[in-house]
Amino acid sequence: MKIIQIVGFSNSGKTTLVEKLVSHSTQHSLRVGTIKHHGHGGELRSQDEGKDSWRHRQAGALISSAVSKGVLQLNVLQEKEWAPDELLKLYLNFPIDVVIVEGFKQSPYQKVVLIKKSSDIQLLSTLENIICVISWIPLDDDVKQKLDIVYYQLEDESNYINFLLQKLKG
């Protein structure tokens, strides 16, 4: 199972890139799973509020699920924050080729970094395992030389999608 992370600050285009990458990957017969880090604080809204599986959790169940017509909704409660490697262990139980992780900047997987404004460039010196940078703004030549990795402008979509597909298929 191949894993790739899409990271960047809020509103840098991460979700849009994940959507495009999922769409192109499935067109190339890859089976894709995604993981999204909800980094905005607060609790996630439950999809089953008031339903039986929600009531199970309210009564004390740590895990509850609802199944219908091939769809599984699973809720698992734990006291600590979920780490990507814990989630990936769960994903191993499903027939997928690729997992695209949105967020979790400090995780060790191969990363695509989105740069929207010049203040975002500092991310490049704080993250590890960067394979590609996609930028909304032109980067100075000295910044690009220091990167020593693949760099694309945001509008160069077909090239960076092809680059990422090759990574996922390879």
Image (spheres, rainbow, N blue to C red):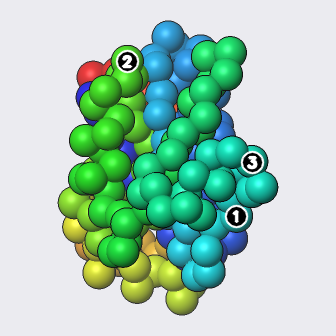
Q: Residue at x 44, y 50 (%)?
A: 63
First in residue order: circle 3 vs circle 2: 3
Examine the rendered structure and indicate whether residue 8 appears above or below residue 13: below
The local crowd at label 1, few if under 14, some if 14 to 19, many if 20 or more residues have their Cα within 10 Å, is few
- 3 or 1: tag closer to the N-terminus: 1
Q: Which residue is mark 3?
A: 51
Which element type, helix, strand or loop, lies under badge 2? loop
Residue placed under numbered mark 2 in the picture: 95
Q: In the rendered image, is residue 30 in sight? A: yes
Label 3: few (<14), some (14–19) or many (≥20) C-alpha neighbours in 10 Å: few
Image side of residue 92 versus residue 121, left or right = left
Mark 1: which secondary structure? loop
Q: Residue at x 37, y 18 (%)?
A: 95
Tell me the kind of residue under disc 1. Arg
Label whose residue precedes the other's in the sequence (2 or 1): 1
Q: Bin the neighbour count of mark 2 within 10 Å (Cα to Cα): few under 14, some 14-19, many 20 and up.
A: few
Q: Is residue 167 visible?
A: no
Task: Looking at the picture, tell me which residue is in the foreground, 81 or 113.
Answer: 81
Residue drawn at 68 percent across, 71 percent down: 11
Q: Quadrant of the N terminus?
A: top left
User: Amino acid type of disc 2?
Assistant: Pro
What residue is drawn where x is 58% and y is 81%? Answer: 41
Find the residue positioned furthest to the right.
Answer: 50
- Asked which quadrant contains residue 113, the reply is bottom left
| Front of the two marks 3 and 2 | 3
Identity of the residue furthest to the front in this view: 59
Question: Which residue carries the number 1 mark?
Answer: 45
Residue reaching furthest to the top:
29
Q: Position of residue 66 (x, y in %)?
A: 61, 34
